Image (cartoon, rainbow, N blue to C red):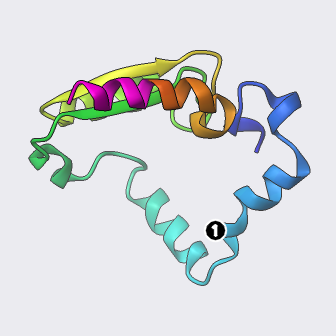
Amino acid sequence: NQMSYFDKETFATEDALRIGRLHCLRDGWNDALVSFMLSGGFSPSQKVASIRARSLVLWGRQDGILNGSEFANKFVETLPNAELEWIEECGHVPHLEKPEETAKVIAEFLSTV
């Protein structure tokens, strides 16, 4: 929960922790987590390279879960027609932490498609 937000005081609440952990309570989560860790971690699927549509990669600049300098760039390098937009002073969940700015970036992207 603390790693998810740039503004921890405002957003890293007990309610956010409960909601953020819901997926961890699902059947199969522990096995999936072990499998993920043994795989070497996050990387875009091989299928991502086959996406030909213009794509928006939107990333919180201070993402403490998936470092954007590494992972956002992996998407941009893998997607043939990707554009990267950073949301400043924002962590892993820009749609929660910076909803207006996130919506604006998405709307601008869609208006030019």
Q: Going by the image, does 38 lie left or right of 54?
A: right
Give the quarter of the image for residue 100. top right
- Residue 80 lies, in percent from the top left, at 12, 33
From the viewer's perspective, is residue 52 above or below residue 58? below
Q: Nearer the viewer, residue 110 or 55?
A: 110
Crowdedness of circle 1 by 10 Å Cα count: few (<14), some, many (20+)?
few
Farthest residue, direction top: 88
Give the quarter of the image for residue 62. top right
Q: Which residue is mark 1?
A: 23
Count of numbered marks: 1
- What quarter of the picture does the C terminus occupy? top left
Query: Which residue is drawn at the image coordinates 14% and 46% (left, top)?
Result: 51
The amino acid pointed to by label 1 is His
Farthest residue, direction front: 111
| Residue 105 in view here | yes
- What quarter of the picture does the N terminus occupy? top right
- Tell me which secondary structure the magenta stretch mostly adopts: helix
SS of the residue under disc 1? helix
Query: Which residue is drawn at the image coordinates 58% and 74% (left, top)?
Result: 29
- Residue 47 lies, in percent from the top left, at 17, 54
Q: Which residues are magenta?
A: 105-113
From the viewer's perspective, is residue 68 above or below residue 13? above
- Residue 50 lies, in percent from the top left, at 9, 48
| Residue 74 in view here | no
Question: In the rendered structure, does residue 107 fall within the stretch colored magenta?
Answer: yes
Question: In the rendered structure, does residue 87 fall within the stretch colored magenta?
Answer: no
Q: Going by the image, does 85 lie left or right of 3?
A: left
Query: Which residue is drawn at the image coordinates 33% and 22% (left, top)?
Result: 84
Query: Which residue is drawn at the image coordinates 18% and 52% (left, top)?
Result: 46
From the viewer's perspective, is residue 67 above or below residue 85? below
From the viewer's perspective, is residue 30 above or below residue 42? below
